[in-house]
Image: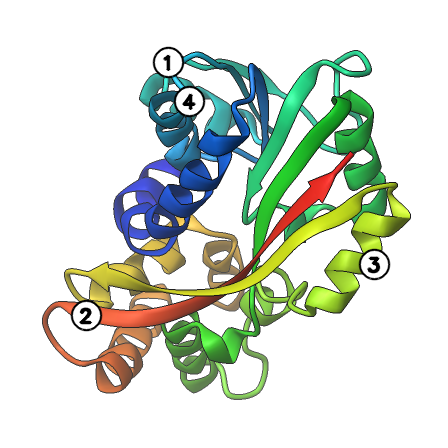
């Protein structure tokens, strides 16, 4: 899964927003950065370049992601860690960052409180979360393809998890509940560029939890063909450029 995620999804969906977060991190001039849910290191490698004087610690709950990410961004210290129980002392970092990971935290207020605990006084928490699935052309097309393939019981991972934390008022309230001040909140739409809609479909069907949901329902080749057909009909054949909307937050400890 990490290899498929890195090959098909990171350049299209995640790198544009990683570049944005790294550019926002640099002016804060942190000396010690903690990244949560670092995945395969898409943001990690950019943080190492954008803030070369900082010590970067990258964490993820998934050990396979940690192993893959550490090979991709070896300049960081990599640790397997649960964002709700961080294995670091109070006040260990100046900046905590998280790219599209907060949606996966079972208890977001608890995870945010942990981020605040490990921040030094005056530290910042910088992260983003996807907007509603209808504002993300790739994910909406994948979901439409899954609904074509499974009209009775389509996988609901995309609308309920990656796009299940899409109300900025709720996110801001959770930050405040965890003890943060909301310093910045911005809606941001960037373009994703893919070689084809089929590549993105393969990425979702082999490199995300959608894979397990499809395998449970059976007939993988037919599902793949249906999803690719629907995505191509929506996004076009050949190279694809499509908009993706997210929210960016900066919390102050």
| Residue bearing mark 1 | 74
Rendering coords of residue 77 (x, y %): 50, 12
Q: Which residue shows up at 41% across the image and 47% down it?
A: 20
State the SS at label 3.
helix
Residue drawn at 82 percent across, 15 percent down: 90
Relative to 40, 84 lies left or right = right
Q: Nearer the viewer, mark 1 or mark 4?
A: 4
Mark 3 and mark 4: Cα distance apart in space: 30 Å
Distance Cα–Cα, label 2 vs label 4: 32 Å
Image quadrant holding the C terminus, namely top right
Measured in 3D between alpha carbons, the distance from the residue under mark 1 to the one under mark 3, in whole angstroms, is 36 Å
Residue shown at 59% from the left, 45% from the top: 127
Compute the Cα span from label 1 to label 2: 32 Å
Q: Residue at x 83, y 58 (%)?
A: 173
User: In the structure shown, which secondary structural element does the residue marked by tag 4 occupy?
Assistant: loop
Gap in angstroms between the C-alphas marked 3 and 2: 36 Å
The answer to whether any part of residue 14 appears in the image is yes
Which labelled disc corresponds to residue 240? 2
Contact (CB < 8 A) between labels 1 and 3?
A: no
Q: Is residue 151 above or below residue 115?
A: below
Q: Earlier in the sequence, mark 1 or mark 4?
A: 4
Instruction: From the image, state whether disc 3 or disc 2 is nearer to you.
Output: 3
| Of 125 and 235, the residue lying toward us | 125
Left or right of 247? Residue 26 is: left
Are the residues flagged by discs 2 and 4 in contact, CB closer than 8 Å?
A: no
Residue density around tag 1, few if under 14, some if 14–19, many if 20 or more, within 10 Å:
few
- Residue beneath label 4, please? 51
Q: Nearer the viewer, residue 56 or 165?
A: 56
Q: Which residue is mark 3?
A: 173
């Amino acid at each position: 899964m990490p290899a498929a995620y890195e090959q098909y999804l990171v350049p299209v969906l995640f790198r544009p927003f990683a570049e944005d977060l790294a550019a926002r991190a640099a002016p804060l001039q942190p000396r010690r950065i903690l990244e949560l849910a670092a995945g395969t290191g898409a943001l990690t490698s950019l943080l190492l370049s954008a803030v070369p004087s900082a010590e970067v610690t990258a964490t993820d709950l998934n050990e396979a992601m940690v192993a893959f990410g550490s090979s991709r961004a070896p300049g960081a210290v990599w640790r397997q860690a649960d964002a709700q129980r961080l294995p670091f002392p109070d006040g260990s970092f100046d900046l905590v960052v998280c790219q599209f990971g907060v949606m996966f935290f079972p208890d977001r207020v608890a995870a945010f409180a942990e981020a605040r605990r490990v921040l030094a006084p005056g530290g910042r928490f910088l992260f983003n979360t996807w907007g509603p699935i209808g504002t993300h052309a790739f994910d909406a097309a994948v979901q439409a393809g899954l609904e074509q393939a499974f009209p009775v019981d389509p996988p609901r991972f995309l609308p309920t998890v990656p796009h299940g934390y899409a109300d900025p008022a709720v996110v801001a309230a959770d930050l405040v509940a965890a003890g943060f001040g909301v310093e910045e909140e911005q809606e941001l739409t960037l373009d994703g560029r893919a070689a084809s809609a089929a590549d993105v479909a393969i990425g979702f069907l082999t490199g995300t939890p959608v894979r397990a949901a499809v395998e449970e329902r059976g007939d993988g080749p037919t599902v793949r063909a249906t999803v690719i057909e629907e995505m191509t009909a929506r996004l076009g054949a050949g190279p694809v450029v499509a908009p993706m909307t997210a929210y960016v937050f900066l919390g102050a400890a």
